[in-house]
Image: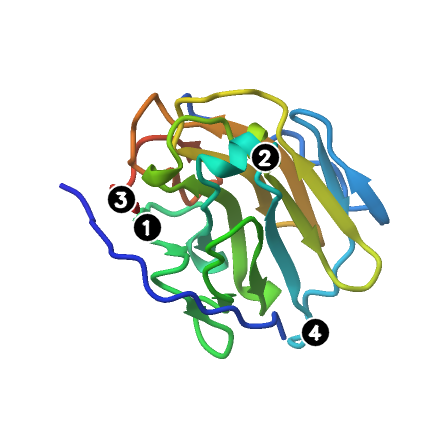
Amino acid sequence: MGIFTRKPAATIDEPATEPTEPTDPTPAPTPAGTVSLSKGASTGINLTKTDPALQITAHLDWDGGTASRQARGADLELYILYVPRENVGTAANTIGNAVYYNSLGHLDRPPFIRHHGDSLIPGRETATIGRLDQQGYALVCAYSAVGNGVGSFKSFGAQAIVTDGAGQTVTVPLYDDNPNAYWVAIALVDFTGDGAVIRQVEQYSRPNSESRPVLYADGLVVMDAGPIEFKR
């Protein structure tokens, strides 16, 4: 069974596979400064999660790649899959937990995550994650609209950027060319420790699969296991 959605008019707000197990042991959070992660690497950032005003921002950036690549289409979508802290380590069903262009979320009530709107052209889509004491895991994913045709996320120049807005910024690039995937899971953010740990996961969907990834309550990432998304 699938979920087929029509694309709404663009709105941009300013921000206010194989199963992949979380890294064990988890590295202790340390000041990240400005870090670009290598493939499969992770880094910790310090966060005062007891401060209800503290937020972090997750961006999906892409430049569309070469001129010829842009001419064939360059419409990517940012998805944040999430597990609330109260569900971590439980059997709670988290398959439907996602904020994206068609389900923007909220900052003043659960899930305390807000997607700031759909970009129709290469550039940036942004989500803000608040109430960090209520967060368990967040998975930064990208979806490539069907109308883009064949092309890898790397060829679009796609990357994730996670920042606290106060000098700690982690860039999460992609390293593999996979021209037949509609989905990529880019970065897993683990809030279950004292700060947050950001890991480069880079997992792709099967060729031509439109089923989105699933983030389970223990931080496990499984590709091709979620609802079908279809966007031209």
Question: Horizontal placement of 89 versus 162: left or right?
Answer: left
Q: Which residue is denoted by mark 1 in the rendering?
A: 92
> For the view shown, which residue lies furthest in the left direction?
1
What numbered label is drawn on residue 51? 4
Left or right: 110 in relation to 49: left
Q: In which quarter of the image is residue 215?
A: top left
Q: In this view, does 205 lie above or below 70?
A: above
Distance between the Cα atoms at labels 2 and 3? 25 Å
Q: Mark 2 points at which residue?
A: 67
Viewer-proximal residue, 215 or 8?
8
Question: 83 above or below 133?
Answer: above
For mark 3, give the secondary structure: loop
- Residue 63 lies, with reference to residue 50, above or below; the image says above
User: Which residue in the structure is indicated by mark 3?
Assistant: 230
Instruction: Check disc 2 and give the amino acid type.
Output: Ala
Q: Position of residue 230 (x, y in %)?
A: 26, 44
SS label for mark 1: loop
- Indicate the colouring scheme: rainbow
Crowdedness of circle 4 by 10 Å Cα count: few (<14), some, many (20+)?
few
Residue plotted at (55% across, 48% down): 122
Q: Nearer the viewer, mark 2 or mark 1?
A: 2
Q: Which amino acid does label 4 sit on?
A: Asp
Residue 80 drawn at (x, y percent)? 47, 52
Label for residue 2? none
Amino acid on which the number 1 mark rests in the picture = Ala
Find residue 197 and report its image quarter.
top right
Callout 4: SS: loop
Q: In this view, does 81 lie to the left or right of 122?
A: left
Q: In this view, does 84 lie to the left or right of 97?
A: right
Q: Are marks 1 and 3 in contact (CB under 8 Å)?
A: no
